[in-house]
Amino acid sequence: MSEYLVLIHHDEQQAMQQADPALYERTARAHEEFRAANQTRVREGNRLRPSSTATSIRRDTSGELVVTDGVFVESKEVLCGYYMIEAVDLDEAIKIASQVPAPFGGVEVRPVWPMDEP
Amino acid sequence: MNQAGDTYVAAAVADAHRQCWAYVLAATVRVTRDLDLAEEAVQDAYVRALHTWPATGVPDQPGAWLAAVARNRAFDVMRHNATWRQTVPLLVDKQASPGVDETSVDAVTDDRLRLIFTCCHPSLAMEARVALTLRLLCGLSTADIARAFLVSETTMAARITRAKKKIAEAHIPYRLPADEDLSQRVEAVLNVLHLLFATGHTAPSGQELVRAELVERARDLARMLRLLLPTDPDVAGLYALMLLTDARRDTRTDSSGRVLRLSEQDRARWDRRAIAEGLAVARLAARAHSAGRFPLMAAIAAVHAETPRWEQTDWHHIVGLYDRLIAAWPSPVVALNRAIAVGHADGAQAGLEALDRLTAEPQLAGYQYLPAARAEFLSRLGRTDEAQLAYREALLLTDNGAEQEFLATQLRSLGS
C-alpha cells in the first residue's frame, strides 16, 4: 500500500459565480458518497477556505521572512480541498481520485514520499 | 573462430537483439523488480553471447539462453551489491498468473504485456511513452532514440530517467490492467505504436522521407502485440494498417529521392507478401465491428492495396469508409483526408469545397497537407494563381526535405 495526496483544484471565480445552494448541497452529498464508497482507502480529507484567505511566507534574498496575502502561485485554478488516500498502485489511486467530485476543476494525484524511503 | 564464423555469430546476436530483447528484459524485470538493473543485466547477457557463442555455437533458443544468463547476472548483482535495494522496487503482481510456471509461455507472454502496458501508461507523457517503448521493448540505445526524434542525447537520457523514476516512485504498476480498463489501455499502447510508425513513415524533418528503423520497430512491436492479444480487433487493425502502408515504401520515392504520389507509384513493386498478410489481418479486424479507428484505417489502406491501377480506385467506397472513420474518430486530419477522397470521387470542385470547410480548423493551422491538397485541386480547376499561392504556403510549412522538393517541383510545373 502507498499513500497518495489527492489535491482538488477549481476555478474559484467560476465556482463563486455559478454555485447556487442546490449545487453546493449536491457537491457536499457527492463527497459524502465518495468517502462512503472508498472508506477503506480514504484516510482523511477536507475542503479549504477560499484563496482570498491564504497567506504565503517566503524568505527574501537577504534571508528576511516575508509574509504576503494570497496563494503561493497565482493561477486561474486554485487548491480548494484534498484527500489523503491509500492505494496499492497508481492505477488504483487514479481510479479513486477520478471519483472525487470537482464540478469546477479537477484533481492532481501525488505519491507521498515517506521520510524513511530513499 | 574464423572471420566468417564471427560474422555469423554477430548476425545471430543482432537477430536475437531484435527478436528477443523485450522477452529477455521482461523475464529479467520479474526477478529484479528494477528496470535499470534488468537493463544492465540484459545488456551484459548480449555481450556474453558475443563472446560465448563463437565457441559454443548459437543456442537453439537464443532467447531462453539470454534470459537465463541475464537472470543469473541480476542475481549476482543483487547478492553482491546492496545499493540496488535502495531504489523503489517495481510493483510486480505476484498473483497475476497463479500456478503458472515462471518460465512457461504464459508467464512470459504476461511479462511482455506487463512491460508494454507499463511503458505506455497513460500517466506518462506521450514523448516519454515513446522513448521508453523504444528503449525497453526494442532495446534501442538512448543515442539512437535521440537521433530518431532529433533531440540531444542528454535531453533524451533525462526524459527516460524521469519516466523511469515516475514508474518507480508513483508506483505505476507492472501488471496487466484490470479487464474493465483493458480496452482503454490497449488503445493507449496502440496510439504509441501508431505515433512511432507515423514518425518513421514520414519523418517530420531531415532529407529522407522514411526513417526505416522506426517503421520497422513499430511494425515488429505491433506484430508482437498481435501475438500477445490475438483476438483484439484494434491491434489487428493497426498491424494491418502498418503492413499495407509500408508495403508501398520502396515506391514512395524515385531513385533520386523525389516523392511520388499514390497515383505515380509503380504498384508492381509494392510488397505483395506484406499486402497479402495485411489484407488477411485487415479482414479479420473488420469482422469484429470494433468502434476503434485502426480497423477502418486498415480498410482504407486495403482498398488501395487491392486496386491494380490508380485509375480503378473506388473512391466512393473510400469516402464511405472515411465517413465511418470520422464517426469513430472525429479529427480534422481525417476530415482532410476525406475531403481529398471526395475530390477524387466527385471532382476537384467538390474536393475543394470540402477542403475549404476545414480552413478554420485550429488543428489544421500549420498543417502542410491542407494547402498542398488545395493547391492540387486548384491547379486541376485551372486556377493557377491560387494554386501557386497554396503550394508556396505548403512549402513554408514543411520541414521534410523530400516533401519540400516535391512541392517545389509542383510549383515549377505551374510555370512559376
Image (cartoon, coloured by chain):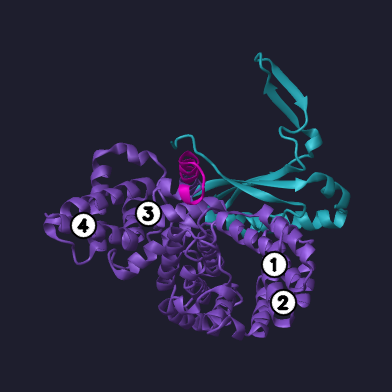
Chain colours: A cyan, B purple
Q: Residue at x 64, y 57 (%)?
A: A98
Picture quadrant where residue B260 is located: bottom right
Q: Earlier in the sequence, mark 2 or mark 1?
A: 2
Check if mark 2 and mark 1 are on a common chain: yes
Discs 3 and 1 lie in a common subunit: yes
Query: Residue B193 location, x and y as percent?
Result: 50, 63
Disc 3 or 2, which lies upstream in sequence? Answer: 3
Q: Are marks 3 and 2 on the same chain?
A: yes
- Mark 4 or mark 1: name the one nearer the start of the chain: 4
- Marks 2/1 in contact by CB < 8 Å: the verdict is yes
Q: Amino acid at mark 4?
A: Thr
Q: Say the numbered circle drawn on residue B343.
A: 2
At label 1, which amino acid type do we have?
Answer: Ala
Q: Judge whether B68 appears above or below B184 on screen.
A: above
Residue B7 is tagged as 4
Q: Which residue is mark 1?
A: B373
Disc 3 target residue: B139
Q: Nearer the viewer, mark 4 or mark 1?
A: 1
